Structures are given as C-alpha cells and as structure tokens.
C-alpha cells in the first residue's frame, strides 16, 4: 500500500520528468538563451543597433581604445536599463569562466577608478584643465562605455557576439555547438592600484608573472635564443586591425623542454585560454596539441623583471599570445588563433579586420571633443 506522502512524491517526480527536458541544455545552448534574453530586454531601436548580420565585417572591427577614439558597434552599457545590464552580465557569465568574467568585469570597474585618477590629475594641471580633448578623454573613462553586439540569430547554429571597450574586447563565435573566443584583448591601467581604499587590487594578476616564471625556467642558452631585443616593444604586434602582421616566428622553438618547463608553459597558455568557458579552453588546448607543441615559439623583449617594461610572445599554428608591459603600471595582452579567429575556419568566411591608425584615432578624439564642447556651450 502506498502512503499519501509517498504517492505525492511519486506524482511530483512524474510531473518533473514531464516538464524538465530529459537532457540538460548544452553549454552553447545556454549561451544562446542568455543572448536571446538580452535581445528581448532591448527596445526596438536598441535591438536594431545591437543585432547585426553574421557576415558583416563589423565583427572584425573592434578596438581596445576609449570610445572617443573608436566608436564600437552595438549598444553601450550607459544606454541600458538595470534589467538590460543584468542581461549583459548573464551573457558574459554564460560565455566566460568565472576567472574570465572576473577579469572582464574587473577591467570595466577599473575604468571608473581610472576616471577618478585622471580627473584629479586634470584638475591639478592648469595648462590642461581647459583642454577640451583632455576633458573628453577623462569623461570616456567609464564602466558604462562598453558595447555589446550580437551577430546573426542566437537561435541559429552559427552566430556570435562581441563586447568591446577600453582595455577589454572579446569576440565569441558559436558554430554547431563549438565556441571560439578569439581574438580577445585584455589590458589594465592601473595594473595594480597603488593607493586608496583599493590599494593592491589587480584585474590581471598573473599574466605578466606567468611569462617571467617561464623565462626564468629556461637555461642560459635557451634564454639567449628567446631574447630578441633588449627593450620592450611599444605595444602588442597583432592588436586590432593588425592581424597576420607577424609573418615569421621568432625566438626559441619549443622542441625540447624539461618537465618543469613544459608545466610552466602549459600554465602560461592556460592562463589565457581559461578566460573562456573551460570546455572551449580544453578544446583550444587540444587544437594546439594536435598541431604540435614542438611548433610553438617563445620570444622575449626587455629585462626579465616584474618592475620593468617587457614583452613576450607564444606563437604557433593554433595560438598567438602576446603580452606587453606598457609601463610599470599598465599592460596589454591579446590572444588569437591564427587558423580560426572569428570562427572563420568553421564558418568558411573571411572577415576584413579594420582599425584606424593611432593618428586617426587621436584626430577622431579631437573632433568629438570639439563637438561635445560646442554642444555644452550652446
């Protein structure tokens, strides 16, 4: 005889089996659901700006510069309601690992802190205080100046999305249940907060040290081969608009490493790959392994010291990692897949990557600053 309580539990179980799908949604389905929720939260005009065709070259038009210099495609956070902002964060969390989400959100928050730092510096400088361009630059330092764009229909097998703004830009492609997360650009300024209530905080705490640790694991002959210049470069080489600008590999070919060196190299690469969902990171690591670890090259520029300016690169058929210490408290990094940026290998589509020169970007900033100044005066 079945007791009433047992019968009730039995019926509840039957109802749950009926209501809940027999298999959990795959990870890419969860990303698609989060993207659809974001789009549904937008009004008609916002949706028009946020949703673009999958085959548009806007996918490959992005920047790590402040929006006064390069306007990103999509909808800015500052133009969103609280509900829409929460939807953006759900999409970020669905696509990124907790590590990656912490880095991205930390960099966005750092821009608010940078606004405070730059505002104080501007007010203390009489010569620059009335400079419209300087004021406009400071004004664009903001957590709200990041844009989200969706490419294609998240209900389709192939689509993508992008987040872009100062020091944080990532391009995600979903194709037949696979996730690509390159190119991804991350930078931080300040790299480490020096004073105040947030003193010691870092958004990118490991990237520089991972390179130093691997470089220090090399013997003297290996270090000599890896070192290609005594000084760091100005910036990463294959930043926005400069894809495929590195025709040759340089430095030390990583054919013969001891077990400790292999461990540290794997740890360095994982630091970058695992900003994305872990399944996607493991798939990318497998692609690197299949192409051949022996085909990876490592190069270094500058002193091997945490308090100096330096640059390092890991480069092979399926991975390009660049890290550049811009100055003692400012860094840039980029991750690319030379064979599958923007999921091009999966989609069978090549995107033209455009970005204004630094001089053009400065001119854009001056024009927008002048326009804003004229608007304020009127």
Image: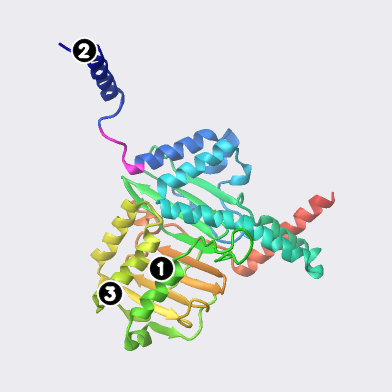
Mark in the foreground, 3 or 2 = 2
Image label count: 3
Q: Which residue is at a point 76% across and 55% down the rendered structure image?
A: 371
How packed mark 1 is, by other alpha carbons closer than 10 Å (few <14, some 14-19, many 20 or more), is many
Left or right of residue 10: residue 273: right
Left or right of residue 24: residue 244: right
Decide which of 13, 37 is in the foreground and name it.
13
Left or right of residue 65: residue 253: left
Q: Mark 3 points at which residue?
A: 260
Please say whether residue 373 is visible from this viewpoint. yes
Q: Is the magenta stretch mostly helix, strand or loop?
A: loop
Mark in the foreground, 3 or 1 = 3
How packed mark 3 is, by other alpha carbons closer than 10 Å (few <14, some 14-19, many 20 or more), is few
Q: Name the residue under label 1.
A: 321
Q: Mark 2 points at which residue?
A: 3
Query: Residue 185: x and y, percent?
Result: 48, 61
38 shown above or below 168: above
Mark pair 3, 2: CA separation: 62 Å
Contact between labelled residues 2 and 3, with CB atoms less than 8 Å apart: no
Please say whether residue 53 is visible from this viewpoint. no
190 shown above or below 88: below
Decide which of 362, 52 is in the foreground and name it.
362
Q: Magenta stretch: give its range.
A: 23-28
Decide which of 280, 157 is in the foreground and name it.
280
Q: Which residue is at a point 47% across and 76% down the rendered structure image?
A: 311
Left or right of residue 83: residue 158: left
Mark pair 3, 1: CA separation: 20 Å
> Where on the picture, by quarter, is residue 283?
bottom left
Q: Which residue is at a point 63% across and 42% down the rendered structure image?
A: 79
297 shown above or below 76: below
How packed mark 2 is, by other alpha carbons closer than 10 Å (few <14, some 14-19, many 20 or more), is few
Contact between labelled residues 1 and 3, with CB atoms less than 8 Å apart: no
């Amino acid at each position: 005889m079945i007791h009433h309580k047992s019968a009730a539990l039995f019926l509840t179980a039957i109802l749950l089996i009926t209501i809940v799908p027999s298999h959990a949604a795959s990870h890419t389905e969860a990303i698609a659901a989060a993207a659809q929720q974001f789009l549904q939260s937008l009004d008609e005009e916002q949706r028009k700006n946020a949703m673009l065709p999958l085959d548009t070259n806007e996918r490959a038009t992005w920047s790590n510069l402040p929006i006064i210099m390069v306007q990103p495609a999509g909808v800015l956070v500052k133009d969103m309601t609280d509900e829409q902002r929460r939807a953006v964060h759900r999409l970020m969390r669905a696509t990124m690992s907790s590590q990656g989400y912490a880095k991205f959100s930390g960099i966005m928050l750092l821009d608010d802190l940078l606004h405070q730092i730059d505002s104080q510096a501007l007010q203390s400088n009489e010569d620059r205080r009335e400079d419209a361009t300087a004021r406009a630059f400071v004004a664009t330092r903001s957590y709200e100046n990041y844009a989200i764009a969706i490419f294609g229909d998240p209900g389709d097998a192939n689509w993508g999305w992008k987040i872009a703004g100062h020091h944080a830009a990532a391009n995600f492609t979903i194709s037949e249940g696979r996730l690509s997360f390159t190119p991804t650009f991350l930078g931080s300024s300040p790299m480490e907060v020096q004073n105040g209530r947030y003193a010691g905080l870092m958004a990118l705490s490991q990237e520089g040290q991972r390179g130093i640790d691997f470089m220090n694991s090399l013997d003297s002959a290996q270090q000599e081969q890896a070192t290609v210049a005594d000084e760091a470069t100005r910036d990463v080489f294959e930043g926005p608009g400069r894809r495929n600008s590195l025709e040759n590999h340089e430095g030390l070919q990583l054919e013969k490493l001891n077990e400790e060196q292999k461990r540290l190299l794997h740890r360095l690469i994982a630091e970058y790959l695992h900003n994305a969902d872990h399944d996607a990171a493991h798939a990318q690591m497998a692609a690197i392994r299949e192409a051949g670890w022996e085909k990876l090259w490592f190069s270094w520029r500058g002193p091997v010291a945490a308090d100096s300016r330096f640059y390092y690169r890991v480069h092979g058929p399926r991975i390009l990692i660049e890290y550049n210490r811009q100055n003692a408290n400012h860094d840039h990094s980029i991750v690319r897949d030379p064979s599958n940026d923007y999921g091009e290998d999966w989609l069978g589509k090549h995107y033209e990557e455009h970005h204004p020169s630094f001089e053009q970007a400065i001119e854009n900033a001056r024009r927008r600053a002048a326009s804003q100044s004229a608007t304020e005066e009127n």
